Image: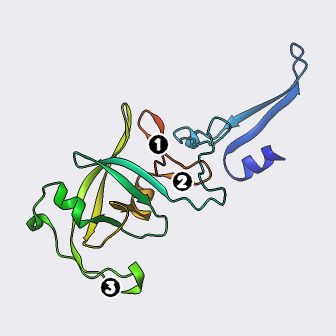
């Protein structure tokens, strides 16, 4: 049945043969896999992933650290409901960057249901991962001067660009790199 579904979903080209191996006395199935799937990466969460949920109800926020430009930035909130990336003004100032480098931007709605002035926007390189397993993406950030417990909010755009898979149960984010699948662990 699973084989028929695989063929129907174009994951398998065809079911070639089946039989019993005389050596191991087990059922043998020979499949021909669709070559278009060869370059796909596989992200698995299994027994090797420890459950890191601090709150049994699963309400803990996903908070990570990564490199933005050349700075290690901590307390980055992963918010799958946000349609933009937000970097808070205090962090931008600590980076020592000039306000003149920012592009003008309009008001931002959504925080406490009232408009927030956006100081500007800019595109920065963001490096996810470490060592040999890294991926770098150019991410467009909006800057707001608003008190927040986090330094940055990563939303849907970077999640889509980096092909992130967020597993709140394991408090991990996995994403592909040129050298394999890497993960970020939540570090609240």
Name the residue carrying label 2: 166
- Callout 2–callout 1 Cβ contact below 8 Å: no
> In x, y percent, where is residue 44?
61, 42
Please identify, in this view, whether the residue under mark 1 or under mark 3 is nearer the observer. 3
Q: Dot 2 lies on which element?
A: strand
How busy is the neighbourhood of tag 1: few (under 14 within 10 Å), some, or many (20 plus)?
A: many
The numbered dot on residue 115 is 3
Closer-to-camera residue (13/76): 76
**Is 108 or 54 nearer to us in this picture?**
54
First of labels 1, 3 by sequence position: 3
Residues under numbered marks 1 and 3 in contact, where contact means CB atoms less than 8 Å apart: no
**x, y (%) of residue 39?**
51, 39
- Find residue 176 and name its label: 1
Q: Residue at x 64, y 35 (%)?
A: 48
Question: Dividing the picture into quarters, in which one does residue 178 lie?
Answer: top left
Q: Give the x, y percent position of residue 97.
A: 13, 58
Q: Nearer the viewer, residue 63 or 181?
A: 63
Q: Earlier in the sequence, mark 2 or mark 1?
A: 2
Residue 125: image tag: none
Which residue is found at the position 58% from the left and 39% from the top? 35
**Disc 2 versus disc 1: nearer the observer:** 2
Q: CA distance from mark 3 to mark 2?
A: 29 Å
Out of 173 and 34, give the one closest to the viewer. 173
């Amino acid at each position: 049945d699973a084989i028929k579904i695989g063929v129907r979903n174009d994951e398998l080209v065809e079911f070639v043969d089946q039989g019993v191996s005389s050596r191991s006395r087990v059922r043998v199935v020979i499949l021909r896999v669709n070559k278009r799937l060869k370059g796909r990466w596989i992200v698995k969460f299994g027994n090797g992933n420890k459950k890191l949920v601090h709150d049994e109800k699963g309400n803990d926020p996903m908070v990570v650290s990564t490199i933005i430009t050349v700075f290690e930035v901590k307390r980055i909130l992963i918010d799958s409901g946000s349609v933009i990336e937000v970097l808070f003004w205090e962090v931008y100032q600590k980076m020592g960057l000039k306000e003149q480098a920012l592009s003008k931007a309009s008001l931002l709605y959504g925080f406490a249901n009232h408009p927030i002035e956006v100081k500007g926007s800019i595109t920065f390189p963001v490096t996810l991962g470490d060592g040999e397993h890294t991926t770098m993406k150019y991410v467009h950030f909006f800057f707001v001067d608003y008190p927040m417990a986090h330094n940055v909010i990563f939303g849907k755009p970077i999640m889509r660009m980096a092909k992130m898979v967020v597993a709140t149960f394991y408090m991990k984010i996995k994403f592909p790199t040129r050298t394999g699948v890497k993960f970020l662990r939540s570090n609240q």
